[in-house]
Amino acid sequence: MNLRTDLALEERENRNPKGPSRGVVINKKNIDNTVITRIEIKNQKAAEGLKKPVGRYITLESEDFKLSDPESIKKASYLLKSELLKLMKDLSFSSALIVGLGNRSITSDSLGPKVVAKTMVTRHIKNYMPGHLDSDILPVSAISPGVLGITGIETNDIIGAVSQKLKPQLVILIDALASSSPGRLATTIQITDTGISPGSGVGNNRGEISRYTLNTPVIAIGVPTVVDLLSIVRGGNPDTPDSSYEKDYFVTPKEIDRLIENLSKIIANGINLSLHKNIDLEYIESFIS
């Protein structure tokens, strides 16, 4: 049985930790105490080997993501902006929809809704009061569609209906992920242009949300906030025998509320800075407040 993870980096580590993988291009560098790993899965055979769709995956890893001081959050926000712009550089868009996936009532799953609450939502202002914002500010809308158990509606159906009505030229998804390593909880941000399947990391596979299902470019941003107990018991060894109960339990850090607050600021800032030109964190703070 494979270790459970949503991270392309961990899938690659768990399946082929040392040798090269045909059809997979990997580049790693360290910037200001943050390890950035870029993985590109170039063909379907490689995708099947890693059980991840063809596309680009950028992983940022830093213990500094746990720090709550304004300078650390600022540094991480601008670093995330830089990596988002790399994924956006080949896209042509003049509007965006931000989607915060997850359950706001469960702290470890509340990352998406908390990011949406910190997003610069501007579509209504651009539509009804166009003179109040500079041309550099894009029309941005945002939703937190909730989860199937609360709404009775599949998340991809909600997003599909909203996208069909609003016709955004870019969709950005934010979701909490699962990791196979406790050390990566709240210290890792994954960005990908392949979309997402909500709940896949905890075994609740929902419908895919991607450029193929929405007919719109999609960027997904995720942070691992839980690790299943089985992965901890195995200690990174997928050959450890299963027990009767460990696969049904998930573990999250005891300070997860503070960590989610930090990371929601970093991700919201990174999104705001990358979508709107010529703004800074002071502008974002004044807009949100």
Image (spheres, rainbow, N blue to C red):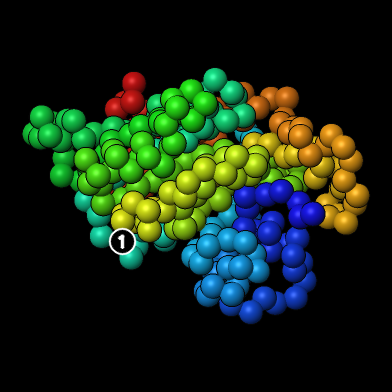
Confirm whether residue 279 shows in the render.
no
Q: Position of residue 2 (x, y in %)?
A: 76, 55
Toward which corner of the image does residue 215 lie, by quadrant? bottom left
- Could you tell me which residue is drawn at 63 percent across and 53 percent down? 7
- Could you tell me which residue is drawn at 52 percent across and 26 percent down? 149
Q: Nearer the viewer, residue 218 or 204?
A: 204
Confirm whether residue 230 shows in the render.
yes
Q: Position of residue 106 (x, y in %)?
A: 59, 23
Q: Position of residue 186 (x, y in %)?
A: 64, 38
Q: Is residue 31 left or right of residue 285?
A: right
The outermost residue toward the bottom is 22
Vertical comparison of 128 with 91: above or below:
above
- Could you tell me which residue is drawn at 84 percent across and 34 percent down? 245
From the image, tell me which residue sits under label 1: 91
* Circle 1: residue type: Leu
| Quadrant showing the N terminus | bottom right
Which type of secondary structure does the marked residue at label 1 adopt? loop
- Could you tell me which residue is drawn at 16 percent across and 40 percent down? 134
Vertical comparison of 97 with 256: above or below:
below
Q: Nearer the viewer, residue 214 or 109?
A: 214
Q: Position of residue 17 (x, y in %)?
A: 76, 66
Toward which corner of the image does residue 246 lie, by quadrant? top right
Q: Is residue 187 left or right of residue 151?
A: right
Local crowd at mark 1 within 10 Å, few (<14), some, or many (≥20)? few
Q: Nearer the viewer, residue 1 or 121?
A: 1
| Quadrant showing the C terminus | top left
Q: How many numbered callouts?
A: 1
